Image: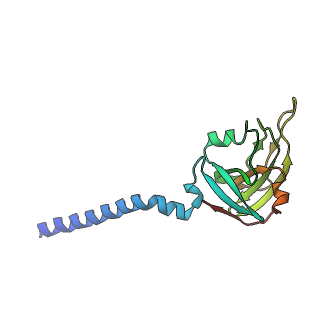
Amino acid sequence: MKREGKIGFAIIAAIFLAVLASAWLLWPALRSSIDPLSSLYDGETVGVYIGNGIINAEVAVSRQKQYQGLSDRTSLADNSGMLFVFRQPARYYFTMRGMEFPLDFIWISGDKVVDLTANVAQPTGSKKPVLISPDHPVNMVLEVNAGTIKRLKITVGATVRIGV
């Protein structure tokens, strides 16, 4: 009986280890299916389907990339932007520090536009950049060229879909 007990224990231990190893190997795929935003990484370009168009957006996930944002760039191509992705919904604050062109801000919670801030001008002369924030908690912010909200007819409540 003792030998049978050891064999049974070994089988149970082997099954447990196999399940544990499988879960470890499958976790990235499972996590991205639960939260598709978790698989996004800095610098990746994704399609953001919103309003009457698509924006090709560079992703900013890390604090460093988010701090840099679009600062110190001289322009932004039409139908392009930067998508800031946050782990927790909150009322994040943005500034036009180091910006050389005006922007529209599209504030997104889940798959919906919850607020819009259009035509935010870059600071000129000795003016300090203003702080911009949404009226509602968000988990994503899409920065695009000023006029994009109007041109694509983006409204609060519009559905947003992120595609790689």
Count of marks overlaid on the render: 0
Residue 54 shown left or right of residue 132 in the figure? left
The residue lying at 73 percent from left, 58 percent from top is 108
For the C terminus, give its image quadrant: bottom right
Instruction: Please state which of residues 108 and 52 is positioned toward the viewer in this rendering.
Output: 52
Q: Is residue 139 something one can see in this rendering?
A: no
Residue 155 coordinates in the image, percent (x, y): 82, 63
For the N terminus, give its image quadrant: bottom left
Q: Is residue 17 something one can see in this rendering?
A: yes
Q: In which quarter of the image is residue 163?
A: bottom right
Residue 71 coordinates in the image, percent (x, y): 73, 38
Residue 154 shown left or right of residue 10 in the figure? right
Residue 47 shown left or right of residue 51 in the figure? left
The residue lying at 87 percent from left, 29 percent from top is 126
Instruction: Please state which of residues 104 and 140 is positioned toward the viewer in this rendering.
Output: 104
The residue lying at 76 percent from left, 38 percent from top is 74
Residue 32 coordinates in the image, percent (x, y): 53, 61
Q: Quadrant of residue 125?
A: top right
Tell me: residue 52, above or below residue 59. Answer: below
Q: Quadrant of residue 128?
A: top right
